Amino acid sequence: MTSLDKIVSLAKRRGFIYPGSEIYGGLSGTWDYGPLGVELKNNIKREFWKSMVYSREDVVGLDAAILMNPKVWEASGHVAAFADPLVECKFCHSRLRADQNEEIKAHEESHKGKKVEWTDPKQFNLLVEAKLGVVEEAKQKVYLRGEITQGVHVNFKNVLDSSRMQIPFGIAQIGKAFRNEITPGNFTFRSREFEQMELQYYVNPKDASRWYEYWKEERMKWYLALGMTKTKMRFRQHEENERAHYARDAWDIEYDSPFGWKEFEGIHNRGDWDLSQHQKESGQDMAYFDQQKQEKFLPYIIETSGGVDRAVLFFLANAYHEEKDRLILKLHPKLAPHKVAVFPLLANKPELVKKAEEIYSQLSTFNPQLNPAWDDRGNIGKRYYSQDEIGTPSCITVDFQTLDENTVTIRDRDTAKQERVKVDDLTKAVDIK
Ligand code: GAP
């Protein structure tokens, strides 16, 4: 089994990620998050929001509609230029991305010795179309957003007029995006429906380079602070011919994944592309007036654009550890679906169960985000291993000594060491802000 297969298998078995619409044979490029997956995903999004919005005075949040007037996508250049090069195998008519060398090579090898011929590359637009309206013949064509970004830029003036933000400032957003990917694959890595977490930071063009460097470093620090291994993370600058149509400069944060170094997050200098395009096509003035400097200009946009699903996948891959007799998911405690588990040593001793229930309810009242797990099945060793596999940092066991001394054992996931702690000190011992 490759390490990606192991992650896919764990994700399904323990309820992190399932194939979308599985009972009907699935739908390529779609995934459903199970009881643990939704917690991990929400924890990632919460940490993003905490670092971007709650801890900064220069960033506010926004939640724009997925469906937008199609003129937005014409203005943003996505109708004309949001495309990947598609080639078709002349033997079996499989369609692949011409710029994905590894996939092309694997396909050629699958034809065992035959010389594969490809059609010339054609630009294939990635926008997903939908139809809106109640009269069949008069339905309006709309696009499911191909990036969450445009919902922010069309609201640039609304945010300025309804808040006290002054440049430099940013707008953060998290939400779904859709792309008609030619070859979805590598589990959730390339999906057709996925979530993005973005910051659009508006700056004076003169300061764009400085802010670009600043945000590159901030984003790398964020991933490292949440436990990503430093040696498995790097920056890579896009070649000029690789850059998206809106980008003056583009760097990826890449991760050394089970299928090679891959894009984790894109950081772009979008220049004034978006605001000038929307100004031109909507006829609305998108310029910013700096009162202090008495200067009017179209701000440049520095964008940080991460994939939430890629973060789930890469945090899982990075946390996956096999030891001789156990599998441990060494997730950062802030990301772990359950921060703590509570066990009565024996399920058939009502006094132990009652005390464990009290502790469970105390912890979840104290901080609902601890999301305690409960387990009273089988032997205690198996319960520990079961929590190790899903990344629970601490397991609390209520035993007979608890009843005498009001103490419990806390077992640490990574070291498997146990210590005895007073019940009164428990909240301090397991608290994770
Ligand atoms: N607003 C800029 C933008 O969308 P991008 O580089 O196309 O830039 C940003 O996408 C991030 O979104 C990527 O770094 C990746 O994490 C995520 N992403 C893009 N396409 C994806 C897909 N098909 N499946 C999962 N995540 C994807």
Image (tube, rainbow, N blue to C red):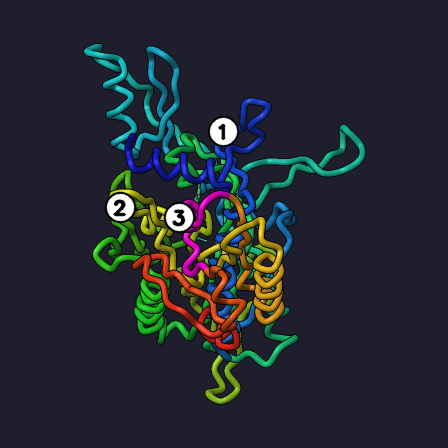
Looking at the image, which residue is at 76% across and 38% down?
133
Looking at the image, which residue is at 51% across and 33% down?
19
Element type at mark 2: loop
Verify whether residue 199 appears in magenta: no
Residue designated by label 2: 323
Looking at numbered disc 1 in the image, what kind of residue is underneath it?
A: Ser
Q: Distance between the Cα atoms at labels 1 and 2? A: 34 Å
Task: Indicate the position of residue 397 as horizontal and vertical percent values.
Answer: 47, 59
Task: Indicate the position of residue 174 as horizontal and vertical percent values.
Answer: 53, 57
Residue designated by label 1: 28
Q: Is residue 412 above or below residue 189?
A: below
Verify whether residue 384 appears in magenta: yes
The local crowd at label 3, few if under 14, some if 14 to 19, many if 20 or more residues have their Cα within 10 Å, is few
Choose between 336 and 229: the one closer to the eye.
Answer: 336
The local crowd at label 1, few if under 14, some if 14 to 19, many if 20 or more residues have their Cα within 10 Å, is some
**Magenta part mainly helix, strand or loop?**
helix
Residue 156 shows up from this direction: no
Q: Residues in magenta?
A: 378-395
Drawn side of residue 161 relative to residue 395, left or right: right
Q: Are marks 2 and 3 in contact (CB under 8 Å)?
A: no
Looking at the image, which residue is at 53% across and 43% down?
33
Looking at numbered disc 2 in the image, what kind of residue is underneath it?
A: Glu
Element type at mark 1: loop
